[in-house]
Amino acid sequence: MTSRNWMKKRRFGIRGRLKKMMKCIFSGEQVRVDEMIDSSESLATRDYSASGYSSRTGEAEPKVDKSNIEEAESSLRESGYLNYEEARALLGRLEYQKGNIEGALHVFEGIDIAAVTPKMRVSISRRGDYNRRHSQSDAAPIMSMHAVTLLFEAIFLKAKSLEHLGRFDAAQSCKIILDTVESALPDGLPASFKTDFKIQEILNKVVELVPELLKLAGDFQEAILLYRRALLYHWNLEVETAAKIQKEFAIFLLYSGVEASPPNLRSQIDSSFGPRNNIEEAVLLLLILLRKCALGMIKWDSSIMDHLTFALSVSSGLKALAHQVEELIPGILERNERYCVLSLCYHGEGEDMVALNLLRNVFRNREHPDCILEMMLASKICGKNEVCIEEGIGYACKALRESHGRCSQKASISNCLLGTLLSAKSRLVSSDSERTLEQSKALSALEASERMMKERDPFVVHQLCLENAEQRKLDIALYYAKQLLKLEAGASVNGYILLARILSSQKRFVDAETVINAALDQTGKWDQGELLRTKAKLQVAQDQLNNAIETYSQLLAVLQVQTKSAGVGNKYSKDRGQRYKSLELDTWNDLANVYTSLSQWRDAEVCLSKSEAISPFSASRWHSTGLLYQAKGLHQDALKSFREALNVEPNHVPSLISTACILRQLGSGSLPVIRSLLTDALRLDRTNPSAWFNLGLVYKSDPGVSALEVAECFEAAALLEETTPVEPFR
């Protein structure tokens, strides 16, 4: 009973002396408290008083914060005294809580952080070492964890004060806490640290704050390193805090424009994944967050899915995104939204029929009739498949009806899609009158789309240009081609090529070549392939065959470097590699045709052997081989080559026409067979002058055909020849 009374008396004695000391500090008086305050603490009091932050005469006595007294009381019980730094930490916290940021910063700056850091490091290290026993004869006194916590909080509040005042050195001030803890406990914080809620709470805040302060200071590379330290070091972070840091880091990697060097993971297993760039690291973080949501560790955050969608889209990882959407727990995404996202993913991967089937599931759901965007996507997909043209027209018309009077932008795009589908339909019909009607409807829909746009859309202008060019309204097509270049600010290679093709259809080959040369001057080496091929074709059209050979050789040199650099590892690289390979194949075939026209058989054969090495089963290569045999007078071999081309690709228009010509020359084919080949060619390409001309020759030799029909064929061939571009418009 005596000992209990003694402890109770001592406790209230400490609190009484502490209140007396705090009252002294806030009032600015010099009161001697021998039991508690040494000379250094008196200096702290004088410094605070002299700086003008003490209460003035006549003002009400400040109310002492009880939490500050309890912190100080804990330190006094553990160490027996309140030193200079701890007193300043308490005073600074009080000023910060009162909103006196400048006053708090002045007090915090009086703490000698460099002097107390070694003591804090030793205390934390010994606190984390539970197996080691310390004797009471240690030379250096160990700082209590209450004192360490108090000083950590002072450093954190100092950083917050600096941030509030716009000081860029706030991060370096706060980073001291991280360095101290990591050097004291290199293997991470033990689980027992979580029992000390106060210090763990401060560490959570510091780990989250430091990267943000570095971003504000513009030190982005250091911010990246601190984000990684926050996530790789074992800080015992709260799940929500760790998730917030992961999300903020992923957002920074995706949108900051700062290229981060790959992380150096010393403990990484050889077979484990290591991100190589910003996108991969951001995707990894977002997938971790998505998994936490699925496991119920954190609340569902829809923005995680939004950022992941962006990251995987720009990195051609749409199939991976589809898998993630399919694995989401039911109820997170609404049913129609899930189908729509999946259809976009599969459409981006080129699996259009899978995407269309998913969209059909949306249209079957009568509870959500308002699905304009889904119908627009479905109509776009249908436009790529001849079998689905009519279905696509239905979707486009329905989207146009539902968007009419509600959103002019959606109505404009719906009109554009309808015009594109009607144009595709016009190329499939056999009747001239029906084809003319569909072309007129297509042009009307595209013009309506242009009128509805608040701002001119390059896609709409491009479709208008193509449709007018194919209908041989070349002056209007030329106008739209120039408008397209202005809208795209010359950034699109396709815009230059389309303009050059329209000029070539007007037989303005010199102007067309000038356009291509201007595009080459503004385009990097990687994007010059199609431009060089168009330039070579323009030179062939002008009978500048030697110049064309030189241009083709330049193109092949560029392609060789591009193919080797395309690499593997992601869909984008594979698609680009396939595009380069296809362009190289066409280039070798074109070059073989040029050498054939110059009667340089050996050079033509070498080009065809190069083409065969790229693709043994190529209709265009077999056709070029047939032209070579035909030039040599080997008509049977030529016929065999043309038939091989048709076996590979039954709708290869040049091979259909060449086969008909050879059969007519040899006289070994009946007129109905030859006529069938040519009409098939015209069904596929109604604007081919060679097909019309050869059909006229067939009709001429057929007594059953009237002279008017023969004349119409020759007239069509002559008119089309005058407006045929060096390459098809589409």
Image (cartoon, rainbow, N blue to C red):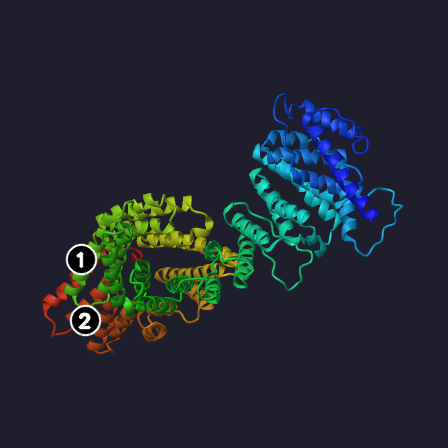
Mark 1 residue type: Ser
Res. 75 image quadrant: top right
Res. 106 image quadrant: top right
Please state, as top left, top right, bottom left or bottom right, where the C terminus lies in the image.
Answer: bottom left
Q: Earlier in the sequence, mark 1 or mark 2?
A: 1
Q: What residue is shown with label 1?
A: 440
Residue at 27% from the left image edge and 69% from the top image edge: 657
SS of the residue at dot 2?
helix
Residue 725 rendering spot, x and y as whole percentages: 28, 55
Position of residue 143 in the picture relative to residue 459 (left or right): right
Mark 2 residue type: Val
Residue at 22% from the left image edge and 70% from the top image edge: 679
Q: Please count the marks in the image.
A: 2
| Most foreground residue, 674 or 472 | 472
Q: CA distance from mark 1 to mark 2?
A: 31 Å
In the image, residue 217 sits, relative to residue 301, either above or below, namely: above
- Label of residue 698 in the image: 2
Q: Using a 10 Å C-alpha cutoff, classify the residue at mark 2 as few (fewer than 14 neighbours), some (14 to 19) or many (20 or more).
A: many
